[in-house]
Image: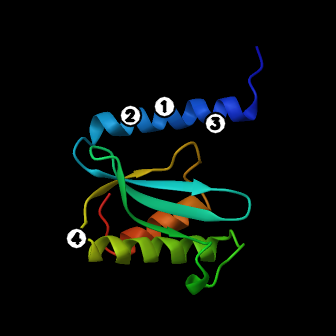
Amino acid sequence: MANSKRDLFLKRRLRVRNKLRKMNAGRLRLSVHRSNKNISVQLIDDVKGVTLVSASSLEKELGFVGKNNVEAAAKIGATIAERAKAAGVEDVYFDRGGFLFHGKVKALADAAREGGLKF
């Protein structure tokens, strides 16, 4: 039975998220979303159901509107680390969703680690 790419993506996203939830109870989730044109990341408190901070390539002050490349992802990662530290958050767990930890997602994670986030 052939599954569509979207079905496989959703299945992979749920598998990753559920494994991470079991291992990292009590920590905030650093969730990444990547589209063909943009990349965004949010720091989410799942217990309260709120987003504490976020960063996206759609923000004009970052200068990457409509760009989804490795440089933009690294800048977004550094920005989310800076905003998280300002909010008093240091320990998070990285939720890549259904995206592979390669390229843009890896660049974002490395920049966030360099910025001081621990995951």
| Res. 72 image quadrant | bottom right
**Pointer 1 and pointer 4: residues touching (CB < 8 Å)?**
no
- The residue carrying mark 2 is 19
Please report whichever mark, 3 or 2, sits nearer to the chain's N-terminal start.
3
CA gap, disc 2 and disc 4: 26 Å
Which residue has dot 1 on it?
A: 15
Type of amino acid at the residue the image marks with label 3: Phe
The picture places residue 115, in percent across and down from the top left corner, at 36, 76
Task: Assign a secondary structure to mark 2.
Answer: helix
Q: What is the spatial separation of the Cα atoms under label 4 and label 3, in whole angstroms? A: 33 Å
Residue at the location (24% across, 41% down)?
25
**Mark pair 3, 2: CA separation:** 16 Å
Report the amino acid beneath label 1.
Answer: Arg
**Image quadrant occupied by the C terminus:** bottom left
Percent coordinates x, y for residue 37 in the rendering: 73, 64
Q: CA distance from mark 1 to mark 3?
A: 10 Å
**Pointer 1 or 3: first along the chain:** 3
Task: Please identify, in this view, whether the residue under mark 1 or under mark 4 is nearer the observer.
Answer: 4
